[in-house]
Amino acid sequence: MQKEYISLGLMSGTSGDGVDASIIRSNGLNHYEVLENRYIEYSNEIYENYHKIKEKIHFQKDLKKYSNEILDLERRITLFNAKVVKNFDGFKDEEFLVGFHGQTIYHNPKEKISYQLGDGLLLSQLLKKKIIYNFRKNDIINGGEGAPLAPIFHQLFVTKKNIEPPISILNIGGISNITIVKDKVSTNKLYSKDIGPGNCLIDNWVRSNSNKKFDLNGEIASRGQINEIILEQALELFSNRKNKDKLSYDINDFDVSFARGLSLEDGCSTITEFTAYLIAEGIKFLNKDNSNKYLFCGGGRKNKFLVESIIRNSNLNKNDFDIIDNFHLNGDYIESQAFAYLAIRSKLNLPISFPNTTRCNDPVIGGKLANNY
């Protein structure tokens, strides 16, 4: 019988609002069991500082320019994650492993960099635990995009939940990506790609034009009117951009400036439609050899206006879409569970990314081990 490990995955998405934390038990291969999920919201200080700094970082040189602010925030985020871990009951278990993704501040595979705020060495020292961190670096070094990294976990839960492939997992986080699972075992038949913005533009607009952090259930967008002229101009401008066909995105690859001057509601409607259109175009592009079946996960699945717009723009039947929760999976915690699983695979020196998922040259073993105690 293969040894199983207890692993806690810590995931902070590009919404920058807090930490998703999941504990799983797994052998890192063909079995996993979810033990607990929690969401812990950032303090207002961390939330505001992250978004202020993120808006300053557009080029690699900005990382050096604002290095003092970045390092201060990184320490605060690491201390915050340490408190998160210590509040779990199983924390004192000697076999407890932590997969620490950190908070993405800059992602640019062409420059061979994907920087997540999170000091794995400090976290290991604080917790006296083995920490797996810096998951994306090895993939980028080996020619990959560093994202998406969850597909191998998507394949696992498709198998565990007896979901028949081929099936596509549409994750709508800050950025949207798709995993196509064509086989329950072979990683050669596992495909993934970032296909556009997810919640990032909508959150940015709402955060900048109201006292809210996001558009709950798409309610703000539903009260507005889509400005068709501005939408058409924005889509045309994006279609002419050189980087529109990138394999992985950073939130800085998109902006909401095209909606400037619109009301909160009209801007939110127009931006949500822009987001949905790009996601739908990605679906149509990949649908040439796919099953036409999609499972929504990530925070964006709760935005009814966005989901309905994606389905309408994709020209597919509504029955071809479902939410992952209907398969007894919690769509809020797929990513945090994934990084708990990837931490175990990293410890076992098993690959976490593959040529068809990140475009790396060969299957790549992922995260770095910190054992600083």
Image (spheres, rainbow, N blue to C red):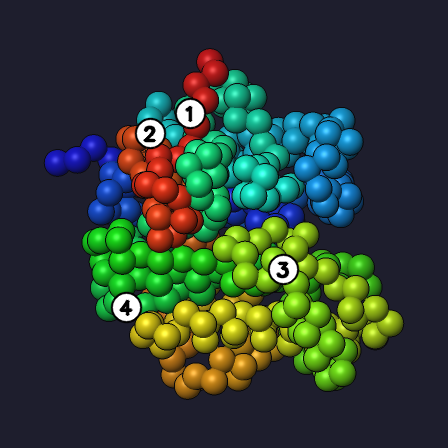
- The residue at the point 33 percent across, 72 percent down is 290
- The Cα–Cα distance between marks 4 and 1, rounded to whole angstroms, is 34 Å
What's the amino acid at mark 4?
A: Pro
Residue occupying the far right of the picture = 261
Residue 95 position in % (x across, y down): 33, 26
For residue 347, which numbered disc appears in the image? 2
Secondary structure beneath disc 4? loop
Answer whether labels 2 and 1 touch (C-beta < 8 Å): yes
Residue 242 has which mark? 3
State how far apart marks 4 and 2 are (Cα).
30 Å
* Mark 4–mark 3 distance (CA, rounded to whole Å): 32 Å
State which tag comes first along the sequence, 2 or 3.
Answer: 3
Judge depth for marks 4 and 2 and give the one in front: 4
| Circles 4 and 3 in contact, beta carbons < 8 Å | no
Q: Residue furthest top?
A: 373
- Would you identify the image quadrant in which residue 29 lies? top left
Residue 174, given in percent of the width and then of the height, sits at 59, 56
User: What residue sits right under mark 4 in the picture?
Assistant: 166
* Relative side of 238 to 161, left or right: right
**Residue 138 lies in quadrant:** top left
